[in-house]
Image: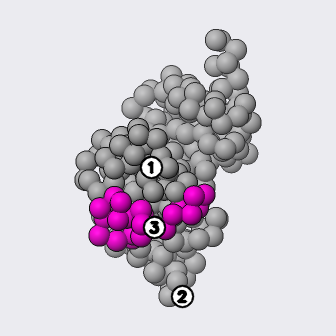
């Protein structure tokens, strides 16, 4: 079953699942993509894969696969641990339960901006599913019970790219350009995937006069496009 993977892929997936280390060979999304190849494309059951990986059951494998339902621009932000500007694996898996694209996007943006825990996110979803109000009202309900945390700011949008092979390069360049404008410590994350971008800034970052006027819903996509165009022209 795992013989369908290369020797490097088998090693990496074994060393990335069933451990609590933060530094693993694969990201959660990379694990999900390998599992998806085995399960969806090659038709190997999750129970068989779990047995090969010496897991007690297939539940964690289903959580990995659920990550692939997240919006493309958010997938590179899924990390093993809890980091500002990123979604932990447990939070991202909880997000996928919202099913609807718009709901997932709203909740993900809130989770990134307010550093939501898995428990808080679950409470918001339960509030909504039990008729406690729309998602915004449920978020406000949860906020009323929590202590103050540092607020971050997430920006999402579309961008034209030259294909998937350029996405890692574009992601690196977007972060570099933003860091040059607002200082590196104020850029918590930046990613480009499937023609969509996301980046997270601190409060100091969004108030920087070099970017503040560009961070409106009407202007942010053109702003990101112009940044990357300038970067390409300088190379």
Name the residue located 25 percent from the left edge and 53 percent from the top edge.
20
Disc number for residue 46: 3
From mark 3 to mark 2, how far is it between C-alphas?
A: 34 Å
Color style of the picture: one colour
Left or right: residue 79 versus residue 72 is: left
Left or right: residue 19 versus residue 112 is: left
| Residue assigned mark 1 | 3
Task: Report if residue 211 is visible in the image.
Answer: no
Q: Nearer the viewer, residue 180 or 234?
A: 234
Name which of mark 1 and mark 2 comes first in the sequence.
1
Q: Nearer the viewer, residue 60 or 226?
A: 60
Task: Look at the image and tell me in which quarter the N terminus lies.
Answer: bottom left
Disc number for residue 172: none
From mark 1 to mark 2, how far is it between C-alphas?
A: 47 Å
First to last magenta residue range: 39-62
SS class, disc 3: helix
Name the residue located 71 percent from the left edge and 39 percent from the top edge.
159
Name the residue located 50 percent from the left edge and 88 percent from the top edge.
130
In the rendered image, residue 85, in percent from the top left (x then y), is placed at 43, 46
Pointers 1 and 2 in contact (CB under 8 A)?
A: no
Residue 58 among those drawn in magenta: yes
In the rendered image, residue 219, in percent from the top left (x then y), is placed at 71, 40
Left or right: residue 235 versus residue 38 is: right
| Residue assigned mark 2 | 131
From mark 3 to mark 1, how far is it between C-alphas?
A: 15 Å
């Amino acid at each position: 079953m795992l013989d369908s993977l290369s020797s490097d892929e088998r090693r990496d997936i074994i060393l990335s699942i069933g451990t609590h280390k933060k530094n693993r060979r694969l990201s959660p999304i990379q694990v999900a993509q390998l599992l998806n190849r085995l399960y969806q494309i090659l038709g190997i059951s999750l129970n068989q894969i779990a047995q090969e990986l010496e897991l007690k059951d297939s539940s964690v494998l289903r959580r990995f696969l659920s990550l692939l339902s997240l919006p493309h621009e958010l997938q590179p932000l899924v990390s093993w641990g809890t980091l500002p500007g990123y979604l932990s694996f447990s939070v991202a898996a909880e997000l996928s339960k919202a099913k609807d694209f718009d709901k997932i996007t709203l909740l993900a943006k809130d989770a990134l901006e307010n550093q939501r825990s898995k428990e808080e996110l679950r409470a918001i979803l339960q509030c909504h599913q039990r008729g406690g109000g729309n998602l915004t009202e449920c978020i406000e309900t949860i906020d009323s019970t929590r202590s103050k945390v540092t607020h971050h700011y997430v920006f999402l949008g579309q961008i034209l790219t030259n294909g998937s092979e350029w996405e890692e390069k574009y992601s690196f360049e977007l972060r570099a350009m933003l860091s040059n404008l607002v200082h590196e410590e104020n850029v918590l994350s930046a990613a480009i995937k499937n023609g969509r971008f996301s980046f997270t800034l601190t409060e100091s970052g969004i108030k920087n006069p070099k970017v503040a006027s560009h961070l409106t819903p009407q202007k942010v996509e053109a702003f990101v496009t112009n940044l990357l165009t300038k970067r390409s022209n300088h190379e």
